[in-house]
Image: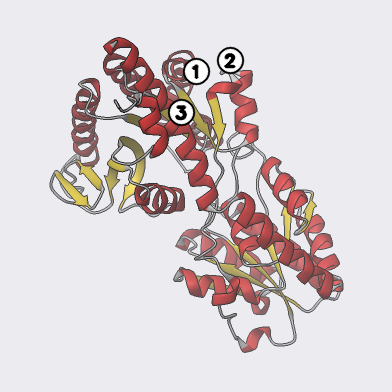
Amino acid sequence: MTAAIKSPAQVLARNALDQTRLLFVAPDDYPAFRVDLVELFSNHLVGRGLKVDWSLRPVADGPARVEETCNERFYLARRQMSERFGVLRYRIAESFLRLKLAWRAARGHYDLIQVRDQPLWAITYALAGKISGTPCLFWMSYPVLDARLRDAVQNLNSMSWPGRMIRIAYALVGNVLFYRLALPLCDHVIVQSNRMRQRLGFRGVPAQKMTPVPMGVTTGRYNAVSIQPVQDPRLEGRKTMAYLCANVLSLLSNLAVDALAQLVAEGHDAMLILIGAVAEKERQRLDARIKNMGLSERVIFTGQLPLAEALGWVKRADVCLSPFMMDAAQQVATPTKLVEYLAMGRPVVGTVHYDQNEVIHGSGAGFVTAYSGKAMAQGVARLFADPQKAEAMGARGQDWVKANRDYQHLADMVEQVYEDHLGKKAGGAGEAGS
């Protein structure tokens, strides 16, 4: 009896990612630290057999090289910042390296191409994919060009006038090229949130061409059972709020301080824990403001901490805060700190925001308030007043995160997207062969 011949698509369906080679181009640092790269790709998807060639930006100076670990290869351009025009030389070297990788992609060395947050490079790699028949996907973790335009117009990074004008021109021209050329050339777009999918839909991107993959956590690491709460005498007998404050500017930290001031004015014996690194300039501004408000003894700065210790402070808190802006660049985000709080079983108070509304209302793990210190204080006071209800709300958040935002679940979503496009490629190859 002659065995039935399986089609390429049937073979791929059995083990979609095994031995699949992906080219991943991103502006992120090497070594990578963002959880959606480390957890989602390096841990989960590579663990399922995916092989990844990375183009990232080295943090430390070094020669041009390829570093290989198991199923991952990291292509790094030469970087010597101490040299004259070191930044410019690195950018040129990086561009040559990425053109070489695009040439490899055009010759069919990869099964999939993934470009993340590089709107104009997406054009080059999408064209390379068209030449070789390799699916090219764009991963939009945040609206890069909108953020650059905002920073330049509002001068958030203290730029010179020529620098601001160059950024504004780049953002405006880049937006035209990105929406009219790059995205139409790409085979699929992975977006950060449902709101981002809606926004891109308004710009003409078909809904079926987009898949939302939000930020998440690995609940095995963010496990409240394995984390010991911090014991600090300054917190004894006091109600505590925690805020993971790894933001560039102190705008959101100011909101947390405003909430503390309102609670103290209402008679609450409250403390605020600011967890994470704060730039020295921002720390000085915050210190001066806190001192002027008479709250110096009620605020604790932990500085940068190992994950387990940072989570120990989160677990010790009675309530966790998640203020988030709603400007054009931020309204499409999926705040990571929110799901980290929920994974640790803590009740939360977050400000109005598309994803935060969805997570908090869907989980029942806290309250959504207006974007003001006074409104957040009112939400916190409700949780302070009923500790048993607050703990019950926090416990509900753990189950919701495990079902919806665990990276095991998110990896399934990404694998399905990749499998669909590998199947289309295999189907096309089968038709050509027949």
Is residue 136 left or right of 155 when viewed as pictured? left
Q: Residues under labels 3 and 2: Cα distance? A: 22 Å
Q: Residues under labels 1 and 2: Cα distance? A: 8 Å
User: Is 344 or 13 nearer to us in this picture?
Assistant: 13
Q: Is residue 108 shown above or below 31?
A: above
- Identify the residue under disc 1: 179
Image-quadrant location for residue 379: bottom right
Quadrant for the C terminus in the image: top left
* Front tag of 3 and 2: 3
Whichever of callouts 1 and 3 sits on the residue coming sooner in the sequence is: 1
- Identify the residue under disc 3: 420
Q: Is residue 126 shown above or below 20?
A: above
**Category of crowding for the residue at label 2, using alpha-carbon neighbours closer than 10 angstroms: few (below 14), some (14–19), many (at least 20):** few
Task: List x then y, in percent, for residue 324.
Answer: 65, 49
Image-quadrant location for residue 366: bottom right
Name the disc covering residue 116, or none: none
Label 1, secondary structure: give it: helix
Name the disc covering residue 204, or none: 2
Whichever of callouts 3 and 2 sits on the residue coming sooner in the sequence is: 2
Q: Is residue 335 shown above or below 2?
A: below
Image-quadrant location for residue 117: top left
